[in-house]
Structure formats: C-alpha cells, structure tokens
Image (tube, grey):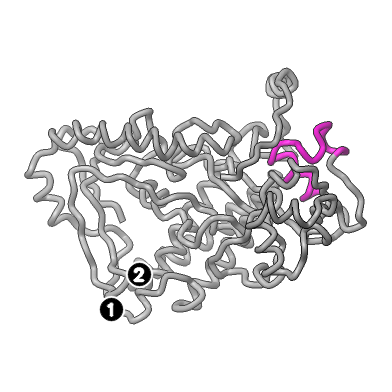
Amino acid sequence: DLLTMPLANGEGVGCYGCDAICAETGDHCRFVSKCTVVATGGCGQIYPSTTNPVVATGDGIAMAARAGAAVEDMEFIQFHPTSLYDPARRCSLGALGSVFLVSEAVRGAGATLRNLAGEAFMAGYDPRGDLAPRDVVARGIYDQMRLHGGDHVYLDATHLSRERAEEEFPHISRNVRERLGLEISQDWIPVVPAQHYACGGILTNTEGETTVRGLYAIGEAARTGVHGANRLASNSLLEGLVFGRRSVLNAIDYVVGVHPLDLEAATHACPGPLTFPREAQHLGVATASAGDAEAADLVQRIQRTMWSRCGILRNDKDLAAGLRELEAITREIEVELKESGCRSLEQAEALNMATVASLVMSGAAERKASAGLHHNVDKPPTARQLATAASREPAAVGAADK
C-alpha cells in the first residue's frame, strides 16, 4: 500500500513511499521516499478475457484510491473487437492470463467479419463496415454473438494468398497456426472482443501530479484526459513518454521542499490495511490459480460480474446488480482482513481487483448518457453528442494496435 500522512499545513495528505512484500521471501519492506510514481499499468484482468499482461490487476489505481487520490473516467473501457478465440483459454475463468490480439490491420487489408451463419454483418451497423472504429465493431460483434447464441464470430482473410499473409502478418499467421492449427489464408479465424485498455485512472494534471501531494501517476494507470471517452492507440505514447518526462521534471522541483522530519515520521508510520501478520510459503506466488483457492474464486466472481454486468453493452439494471455483487465481494475480503490480516499476495490482488472493478461499475452507473466506449442502452448519447459525431469525417482503421 502507499504510505501517506497528513500534511503539516492540514491541507490533505502527502505520499512518502509505500509498503511492499518481497515476492521471493515474503518479507515486509518499507520504501520511504520524497515522491512516488505510480506506473503500474491498467486493470484488464478484472475481465475474463483481456489482451493485458497478468500483472494488469489495477493495483496502483486501487492503492491510490485507498490513499485518497481522485480516480476518474474508469467506465471508459476499450474492448478490442478481434482477439483470437481460444476455447481452452476461456475455460480458465478465475486464472490470470492474456489473449492473443488479431490486429485490425487484417481488416484494413480487406478481411471481412462473418457471423456463425457465414454472413458479413458490419455494413448493417455502420456505413464504414469492417473499417468502423473499434467500439462500433466490438458492439456489432457482441450483438451478433447474442443473436446467434455463439461465443465468437469469424474473421475471413481467405482473400489473401499464403505468401501475402506470411509477408504482411507473420506474427498473426504463426500464432493462429500454433494455437488453433489454422491457416489464415485458408481458414476463417475465430475472434471475440476482449478488454484492451482503460482510458480512466488516477486523475492527474499535465505534470503528472495527482490530488495527493508527492504522488504522481503516468501511463495507463493515469487519467490524463488525452483519450476523452474513446481512445486512439498513439495517445498512449503521450501518457507514457510525455507525461512521464513532465512528472520527472516536476518531481525534481518538488523533492527539494520535502522536510527530513516528514521522512523520519514516515519511517515509523502505521501500515495500511494490507498487512501480512504471518509468514506463508505461497506469498511469492504471482498468480491466483496456484497459491490461494479462495482468492481464485473471488477473482472468478469479479470477472464474471464485470463481463455480464459491465461489458460492451450495459444497462441500468445490470449495473445496479453488479454494484451489489462487487460490494458483497469487497465486504468478504475486508472482514477477513480486519479479523486476521491479509493471508496472501493473491488475496491482496483480489482486493485491488474488487476495488478497481467497483470504480468501473460505479462510474458506468453514474454517467448520465452513453459516450464513446461507455454504451448504456438505457441512457443513449445526447443530441449534441450525436450531432458532433455526425459532423466528423469517418476515420480509417490504422495499421497498428497498441
């Protein structure tokens, strides 16, 4: 957890480092610092299928929220429309992992999305057809899955010769072949939307500063505002490189004013709620599937709730039910923490996932109208939003997936 204390002037709190657990030994470590930067990435693991790495469990965002930092726009979750559908991976609900992304550049090269009946369908959702923006394509695929009772659709790239497929998409060709035994120039590729990016996060200004003094956030963990309600891939470079540099330059000036007595006080400050009262051999286990069966069950419940209640298409009833389900999960964890402390890293990770999932769900429930990546069928976009969207030129599909 982040190490925070009230500021001497009484105006809020300041961050002076963090408490951590050594993954190899299970030992408690306290890092006292004049400033702290959260660069922990996104929260894709709160969904059952994500392109994010296994470490993307929202830990930094959850820690910042517990420290009192403002967190905004978490409801704007981007789902990439075409991850590779792998039945073996989808059977492992509750385990942390990532799915393989089939780049939209394949559609840019002329591939067509087809439903289980073999019908091309995207022209019925958007005049740009298969070249529509990611959120439009993801909703179209999700609707076709609902209509046909399937758990995937197909991407037809059989117009490509084998030579062209290997030349232009060697990584995709190899992975589809190795994972499913299919040739993309001969076989339809089974695809399904998967969580891809969180546009929201820890609220920062243009210098990477959060609402907690001495605490900075950069990258996907931050809500910089550069994405708005949707996301262009290249904007992530801004979040990492530009805001990363700005936060460092600001922090260089900030640390000069940190008083040594504040650091001394931080050294002896009380730990946060995630304390480990006893040694446990499985503290070093990084995935919920190995060391803590109860935590793995909690993760499974979080993932199921997020996909069924706060996925690609949302509604008021599901969002209200999802909030209740996540509140129950969070209470379960907090009661055990209060009674006996945190028993494992997996349990701590489950608490962070429940915290971030609740931020996504509550943000979606509170938003008054659909916008960008947040699509609530009970709260359509405003007339002004629709007029603005209609006035824009259609955007072509880019060649890169980031």
Quadrant of the image occupied by residue 279? bottom left
Viewer-proximal residue among 302 and 191 = 191
Viewer-proximal residue among 226 and 65 = 226
- What residue is disc 1 on? 279
Q: Secondary structure at mark 1?
A: loop
Viewer-proximal residue among 371 and 176 = 176
Q: Residue at x 65, y 34 (%)?
A: 372
Q: Main secondary structure of the magenta part?
A: helix
Provide residue 353's location: percent of width, then percent of height.
48, 58
The correct choice, above or below, for 142 with respect to 206 in the image is: below
Near mark 1 (Cα within 10 A), the count class, few <14, some 14-19 or many ≥20, is: few
- What residue is disc 2 on? 342
Quick one: quadrant of the N terminus? bottom left
Q: Amino acid under label 2?
A: Cys
Quick one: quadrant of the C terminus? top right
Q: Would you say 341 lies left or right of 356 here? A: left
Tags 2 and 1 in contact by the CB under 8 Å rule? no
Residue furthest toward the front? 163
Q: Residue at x 20, y 56 (%)?
A: 31
| Residue 13 located within the stretch drawn in magenta | no
Q: CA distance from mark 2 to mark 1?
A: 11 Å
Q: Residue at x 35, y 47 (%)?
A: 38
The correct choice, above or below, for 114 with respect to 109 in the image is: below
Question: Over which residues does the magenta segment extend?
Answer: 123-143
Quadrant of the image occupied by residue 191? bottom right
Provide residue 269's location: percent of width, then percent of height.
17, 55
Near mark 2 (Cα within 10 A), the count class, few <14, some 14-19 or many ≥20, is: many
